Image: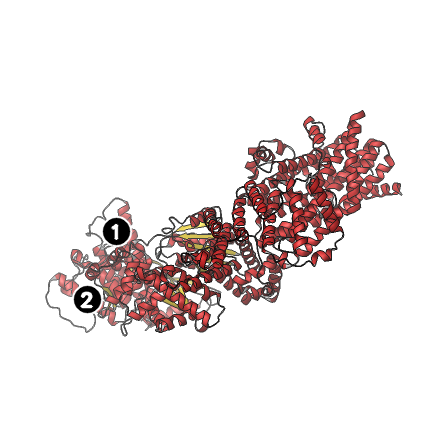
Amino acid sequence: GMDDELHTFLNEFSACNDLHQTEQLNEWALKQWIARSKSRYCTDVLGYLKSGLPIAIKLTELLIREGDYQQNNGQQWRGTIPPASICAAKVSVKAKERGMNSSEALVEVIEDVSIKSSANSGLDYGGPMPQLAALGLVFYELFAGDAPQLLADEALSDGLAMNSITLNNDGNVTPHPRKKSQRRQDACSKCVTRLRYLGMPQSICALVGNLLACSQGDFCGDDAYSTFQDVRLDLQLLLDDPPRFLQDIAVNPLPPLVIPDKHYGRDEEIKKLEDAYFQYTKRSAGGIIISGKGGVGKSKLAMHIQDISQGHFLVAKFDQSEDVYPLATVGSLFNVLCDIFVQNANPDQMRMANEELESSLGIQAGVLVGIVSSLAKIQPSSLELGHSSCINSSESLQFLFSALLRVISSNSTLPIIIFIDDLHWADPISLQLIGSLISGNEGSKSVFFICAYRDNEIDGNERFNQWLGSMSMSSLVTIKLDNLTLCGVNTLLSDTLHLSPRTTRPLSSLVHHKAGGGNPLFLKQIIGTLREEGYVYVDLTSQRWAWDLDKILNMNISENVVAFLIEHMQKLNNEQQQGLIAASCIGSSVKGSMIHILSNDLKIDLQDIFWQVSQKGFMNKVGDGDLLCYSFTHDKIQQAAYQLIPEESRHMHHMRFGLAICSHTMEASLHNDELFFTAINQINKGGAGALSDSNQRVVVASLNLKAGKRSIELSDVNAAFNLFKCGISFLEKGHWEENYELSLNLHDAASDAACFVNDVPAVKFYTEQVFLHARTVDHKMNSKFATTKILSHSNHRKAIQSIFAILEELGEKRLRPREDPRLIASIVTMNGVIRNTTNETFLSTKKAQDKRYMILMKLYVLLIRMLHFAEPTLLASASHRMIELTLGCGLCFASPVSFATYGLVLSSIERFDLAVRLGVVALKLLERKEYSLHKSAVFPSIYQYIFWLTTPLQMISDAHSTGHLVGQQCGDIISSTNNFGLHVITAYVSGQCLRGLRAKYHEHAIQLRSQHINLSFRHNCLGHSQVCALIEGLEWLDGHSSKWEEIYNVPGEKSIIANAKKGNDKLAILQMQKANLLVRTFLFRRFDEASVRETIMTNLFSEKKMHLRTLFLFAIFFEGLISFELARRAEGEEGSKWIAKGEVVLEKMKHWNEQCAWNFENKFLLLSAERKSILGDFDEAASLYARSIKSAHDHKFIHEEAIAAELAGVFFHRLGHSAKSYELLLHSQKCFERWGASAVARRVGTFINSKFGSGFVHFGTGVDDVLASFLSLDK
């Protein structure tokens, strides 16, 4: 009959073969479905179960709905379906069978399950137990394929309860009279036995048995079900995870207890993680910071990104002992990144990356390749550059690493995910680097950062807490991880033991309590211990995991995970403990080369030992051969292993291992920085107290000096400072007498490093030691310089006085003000020397070696930087002395500063020929690597104060952009920001688009404020205000400062000027503001304001003796324009006075035009045209206007083309030439718009409308034709 039904079904289904997708809905009685499916699946038990479980779930959900209906109506749970109706005979199944075509197997989808029953809600069935028992009977028939045979004398009483069941095995079985409860229990047991006989898995047997046990009511066991919800949950587990819950565990051999690699109790955190990554793909999130206690699963959660992304996933983990080798963690991370890029990049990507890196890194690539050796695979030339000095290694590294990450990510086809673990242990320089990388990555779609730290271990870690505070401004999503809840622990144990969560709940409650409240690491260790102790075991009878709750309850388990691990480790044999101790002293991991050295020292095979402990879960093996490495599986395990050593013996262990590694490197003549730094690190952890031999202590002190100097070469001054301090700690009492040179070198190095990290007390301490014990004045100079340098960080005037005192002590004469006759005479003499010396002679001067000379030049370089702002009148004297020293003693690192600064002084006294020569010499020296340290600092002197007389302004702007980049490369942030400001100012002066400059000004202002570079910030804000006024109009400046700051988030001109009176840069601020005022006065025609006229009368730049630079040159040009315009408006003597002032400017422009026509020809021509116009020489004026417009156009000064066109248009309007006037004014308006000065363009448009009106008729003569006619008049 079953064959006939199946045949009919197949015939019906085949009728749909002509459709692309077939689908047919059928309704079956459950018994029919069972028979049909048994035939279909035959011996495929798992397939049959997978098809039957959806029916079981649908049926259970039906009963849940019925029960919920009653409870929602305020009644006790009864259910509207009587137990007698819950039987296979009354259950119907609706199923759809789908297939794409006739050749594919059909897929059955259970749509619905129903029960034919006359509802009777008035009866009380005594809770859900009878229904649960009846459901068990249905499930038995569903999974066994046949119904249990009811005994005639034990029929269901009133159809409500099961009395006794027999199995249809041997036909006639005669029961013996027993108690009803016993008979029920026996029947349940026989049902389960029958299911096992049919090959059903233990989970199905247990589920059916626990349902049938409900027939015993209050006498049922603990495993019996009490709710339909529990049944539903267990059924879903069976369906969702068949390998775990539908397959029996093997018992021969006994299986290990394996915790699944899944996330438990972390649904909310995973959603937040995934949402953050999704936001990153939209460039609205830059990464995630995960916090929590040790062992809560921060790393595991972070690794989830690897599952959902398709990018390159990189991991860096900081060690509790911090990096042994400077920047080892960050360097290793970027080595991997470079290797991945090389493996995946095509030739074009490699070429582009190489070119971009050469441009971005410059000569400092030689520094970076010392930390990231794999950089050479992308940029081979980096190997040839070698080490280069820098101003600030921390700032330099931040820029270099950011540039490397930017270049690689922009040339990669896949996104990059960087996970940085245990960030709270990062060293200062690495922490700054990572912060810079994250901040610089804002808005990027190429790199996603994940950081993790322990929030319970950062109290007192001021450095890290400050870093966290700075990161609060970044678009980082924060996730806080806590211990697992009881529910999470239960889910984990359910999966691990292949049992229902309902079954494992008592065990979970106990384990959760003992595992520190659900710490995942602790939990994992406890579960492993329970298995080892036999408290969790395999029940051979039921073929399932089981446990002994009483024994587990009585276990004495430490509440601290480290203490628990220590107890576990103490059960290992002696050699295994020795191996763990040795590894814990070294760090979180031990590489193959180190394993060999330690094995020889301990006389045991550590490689074998590490393999043994790895089998116990304490360590992981990574790689083989030269890449072999063993690492602790968690730093808590390393901590526990380290605590196996008695506290009083730890110093000796470190010293022993350090000396063994150091001895090996020396004997083998190895040049392995990593081994060397590991040896020094171990020796320093051992401390001076672990060495009694005086000679050994001296050797260790000298090794620390060597390691510190190497750290400086690797740009990690913080590590160097610690090494110098350790070196000093190994010196014995009386070391200044017995080891003077070593003591002096260590103290000088320590004070210099302390100055870099801004540790004022340390600088004071180490310099005072030198002052107390140094044998000569020269030996004190390094310490005196360090004292002055750190003072310059906070108080320029005090630092200048300190330098004066040191210079006097070294025999230097006091500096003289610029007007001093003796200085003027000395400058004249020096100029004669320069005039008679060729550039080639300067460049071939010998290289200086004298130490006192080097100290003097360091002092003068520092002094000149401060004199620019604090005492500019002394700059000429200081620069004169520098050039004297340079010519007398030879070239050194400071020679470019010497030539450029003296050239600046010569420019200010208009000795332009000599100034330009010295500028050229300085640039030639900067091309040599040994003289390039101050390149960024020298560029402003050369380009801003000297080369404006020989070089197009556009090229000067570009040069300052290069100076900005070079400053970033070498960490000279002050000079870098200064160059950027000058780049933008010169771009403004040369007529580049104001809208782009406004964005640059604003972005730079925000950056300067974050870096606390106040002087450049105020200058930048003045420039920003000026550009905004030209774009938006003067009302933006005239409004309230608060409104301005609300819109732009930076202060406006009014706020800057108001606060200028409080700062040392008052003069510079006021000069810049007055220069801006001159431009606005002319462009907005504000000649009638009395205050403006007074300012122009008394503050003309052309009449001041000052260091000229591009902005002031621009202001002088506008002085001339305003002077001639006011002369046109004035009468009599006042008019003559204004003409005279205009002619002063005109004379300067004439002289400068002879030197550099590109920059000054159009300005000279326009001022000449204005003068001729006032004097009535109209024909000459017309020709000069035309030539000025053409010159400005040819030399790319769009703003000055606009000015000349407007003045020419007004000139012709006065003469009555309307057509010419109109065309020129219209051209002026268009040029102002192209410049970006929309407010000025509107003013010109208003003027045009007022003079010509909307009905003006003209012949459309183009401006080119007008200019041509001007030029023909000139001819």
Q: Residue furthest top?
A: 1132
**Numbered circle sitting on residue 1057:** none
The first of marks 1 and 2 along the sequence is 1
Crowding at mark 2 (Cα within 10 Å: few <14, some 14-19, many 20+): some
Q: Amino acid at mark 1?
A: Thr
User: Does the rendering let one see residue 310?
Assistant: no
Badge count: 2
Q: CA distance from mark 1 to mark 2?
A: 29 Å
Could you tell me the amino acid type at mark 2? Answer: Ser
Residue nearest the observer in this picture, 603 or 479 = 603
Percent across and percent down for residue 248 are 29, 69
Task: Out of 90 and 1178, give the one closest to the viewer.
Answer: 1178
Q: Which residue is mark 2?
A: 189
Q: Quick one: SS at disc 1? A: loop
Q: Quadrant of residue 1270?
A: top right
Examine the rendered structure and indicate whether residue 821 appears above or below residue 454. above
Pick out the residue farthest to the right.
1275
1212, above or below 865, in the image: above
Crowd rating for badge 1 (residues with CA inside 10 Å; few <14, some 14–19, many 20+): many
Q: Is residue 1094 left or right of residue 709?
A: right
Q: Which residue is mark 1?
A: 80
Q: What residue lies at 31% left-to-right and 60% top-to-bottom? A: 648
Q: Position of residue 395 (x, y in %)?
A: 54, 52
613 shown above or below 643? below
**The image quarter in which residue 559 lies:** bottom left
Residue toward you, 693 or 999: 693
Secondary structure at badge 2 equals helix
Residue 702 % position (x, y):
46, 62
Q: Nearer the viewer, residue 1227 or 562?
A: 562
Position of 1123 with respect to 980 (left or right) is right
Q: Quadrant of residue 1231?
A: top right
